[in-house]
Image (cartoon, grey):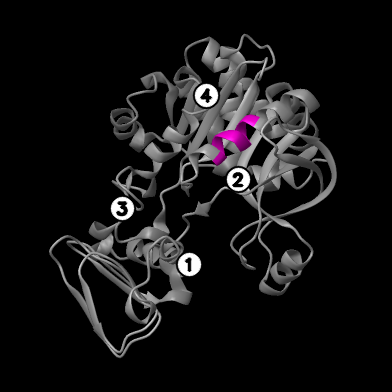
Amino acid sequence: MAQLPVYAVIMAGGRGERFWPQSRASKPKQLLRLMGNLTMIEQAAERLLTVVDPRHILVIANQDYVDPMRRLLTKLPPENILGEIFGRDTGCCVALAAGVIRQRAADKPAVMVVSPADHVIRDIGGFRHSVTDAIEAAENTGKLVTLGIRPAFATTGFGYILPGEEICTGSNGTKFRAVRAFSEKPDAATAAQYVAEGRRWNSGLFVWRTDALMNELKLHAPALNMLAGAAKTGEKEHRIDRVMAEDCAGQNAISIDYALMEKSGELLVGDVDFDWLDVGSWLSIRNQLRAGENNNVAQGLYTQIDSHNCSVVTTPGHLVATIDVDDLIIVHTDDATLVCPSGSAQRVKELVRKLSEKPELRKFL
């Protein structure tokens, strides 16, 4: 049981461009019901509510989406949902949240749980046990704790963590090991080597004491440390919105992984076994749907002749039919349809950029 106060932040600043045409400028991935009846941001909040008091859960989002999220997340205080004007990746997001939490905790040590908004985790009990153990480990050791997922396959889409000697075991049985190496997304050959070495996927779920985080930011990412200080002052003086606009503008866009986790020697990784999916592209949805005839998966009406390994998402009442095709992603909305090979799912973001370059196509963004 944690003795220090526990806070959490949901990082919800992305636009989810790889989920076009469902994801649009007015409705990013976090506000979509991609898996189940709840939006991605609602699912993230509901998971954390099993561990953290709702008054202590923050959401950092793009300013354009603050009001929709406040309407969805009615269990959280509206003032806990904060909007960035300039998206500067997860490094800026973590620093802003850390500053706000330091002020709300009266500048005393607190434990901070960091979660992306775009995960699918169905084993809520396993998630709760693992995060509770990580809170315990972070509080007792003063280390920066991450949760590592045992790889199901080699992929270039995730970072990898090489675990070392065992340091401690949580009350629910989670084992925490020193981190020998924290590496961001590798090429295909290196990914295969990492899996063979027994490395873990980086889940993007982090837990640390705020004082430990600030010490490491001061050492490895001084600009983010200064931003956290500005956010603390801004929260105290009731001008956090101005800090998020003015102080973030001068920050370089950098992930917390590159800014800190790859550099720090104060890391622990918890070996967790709950189900986990990072919803990064249409291809990732395939793993969550039951395959039908010829290994095709579909959300909505779909029929086929001699088609194999296709992933289809369509609107209610609209039928998609295929003949003699293989390994396609097909996504239909009311005003746009995407068709591409499964191996090109990551290139949807390129397509969105191309739409933005043509005035006659910008209405589809």
The CA span between labels 2 and 3 is: 24 Å
Residue on which the image places disc 2: 204
Q: Quick one: 332 or 196, which is closer to the camera?
A: 196
Q: Which mark is residue 52?
A: 4
Q: Where residue 257 appears, x then y in whole percent?
A: 67, 46
Q: Residues within 10 Å of mark 2 (few under 14, many from 20)?
A: some
Q: Residues within 10 Å of mark 4 (few under 14, many from 20)?
A: many
Name the residue type under label 2. Answer: Gly
Q: Of tags 4 and 3, which is closer to the observer?
A: 4
Lower sequence index among marks 2 and 3? 3
- The image quadrant that residue 217 belongs to is top right
Name the residue type under label 1. Answer: Gln
Identified at 70% across, 39% down, the residue is 174
Identified at 33% across, 74% down, the residue is 292
Callout 2: SS: strand
User: In this orientation, does residue 84 appear?
Assistant: no
Lower sequence index among marks 2 and 4? 4
The CA span between labels 4 and 3 is: 31 Å
Please give the range of residues in magenta.
126-132
Residue on which the image places disc 1: 346
Q: Residues within 10 Å of mark 3 (few under 14, many from 20)?
A: some
Q: Where residue 263 appears, x then y in whole percent?
A: 79, 44
Q: Which mark is residue 24?
A: 3
Q: Is residue 324 above or below residue 69?
A: below
Give the overall secondary structure of the magenta segment: helix
Residues at circles 4 and 1 in contact by the CB criterion of under 8 Å? no
